[in-house]
Image: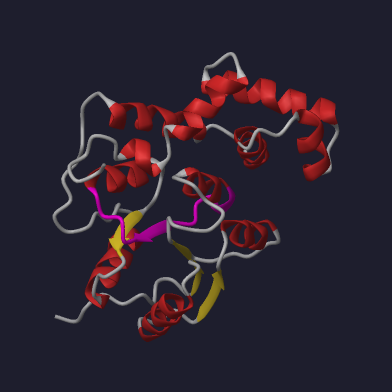
Amino acid sequence: MSEPAGAGFARALIVDDHPLFCEALSLMLREMGVAEIAAADRLAAAAAALEAGAAPDIILLDLSLPDVNGLDGLIRLKRLAGATPIVVISSMEEHRIVASVLRAGAAGFVPKQSPRDAFARAFAAIRAGAVFRPDGFVAVEGDGPEGEAETAIDRLALLTPQQARILDAVCEGKLNKQIAHDLDIAETTVKAHITAILRKLGVHSRTQAVLIAQNARYRNILRDAPGVP
């Protein structure tokens, strides 16, 4: 039986900041039948490409990017990508990370060291409308830190791309005036967005909003997991 090919996806966007891995992944995708391959080494560059009209059939996203801290990158990219499936490719294979990635809307998760067959199976599953889970994945359920992270992911997914940018700036400690200057919008617009952000996150202060964002970061998702200090 022949292995599934990637011909169902003609255009791919790779979002990864490791040149050698991007080169190897691009070569593999071409061998699988993907004709057009673009790459971005930052989430901001990928977002800009999508906002400018880029229309990949599939996006392959590394979670560890210089301008991303946690799952907010995936959540933000998914808003811009619309119906385009996003496959997360990461060296972080902990079950809680995989579960959180899928909960955040990824169409699949493929560990970075996986052979070509895993990518082929992932593409075949996604083309068939299924969500691809890596071999050996065990769903994580229950309360505790991971439950808090799931709640944070669900709430953050409600934000628009602009609201996500503003929340990032709030997390950096920037004032409304600074945010308005950076985003080239009116300060009153920033205030309106922050009001909407607080409402969507179900909180009453900027500090509480920052805590929600922090709960979606890797360290909080993995807190109390075996082997994590």
Left or right of residue 82, residue 44 in this image: right
Please identify the quarter of the rendering in which residue 39 is found.
Answer: bottom right
Which residue is at 30% across, 52% downward?
Answer: 131
Viewer-side residue, 206 vs 164? 206
Q: List x then y, in percent, for residue 4.
A: 26, 75
> Which x, y percent locates residue 177?
82, 32
Left or right: where 17 falls relative to 55: left
Q: Is residue 103 above or below residue 121?
A: above
Q: Tell whether position 89 is magenta.
A: yes
Q: Toward the viewer: 23 or 219?
A: 219
Looking at the image, which residue is at 55% across and 67% down?
41
Q: Looking at the image, which residue is at 53% across and 20% down?
A: 208
Seen in the picture, residue 188 relative to 41 is either above or below; the reply is: above
Residue name at image x 68 percent, y 56 percent: 51
Quadrant for the N terminus, please.
Answer: bottom left
Q: Quadrant of the C terminus?
A: top left
Taking the image as shown, residue 180 lies to the left or right of residue 64, namely right
- The outermost residue toward the top is 204
Quarter of image, res 220: top left
What stretch of residues is rendered in magenta?
A: 80-94
Residue 189, position in %: x, y? 80, 29
> In x, y percent, where is residue 194?
68, 25
Q: Residue furthest front?
A: 229
Left or right: 118 with respect to 36?
Answer: left
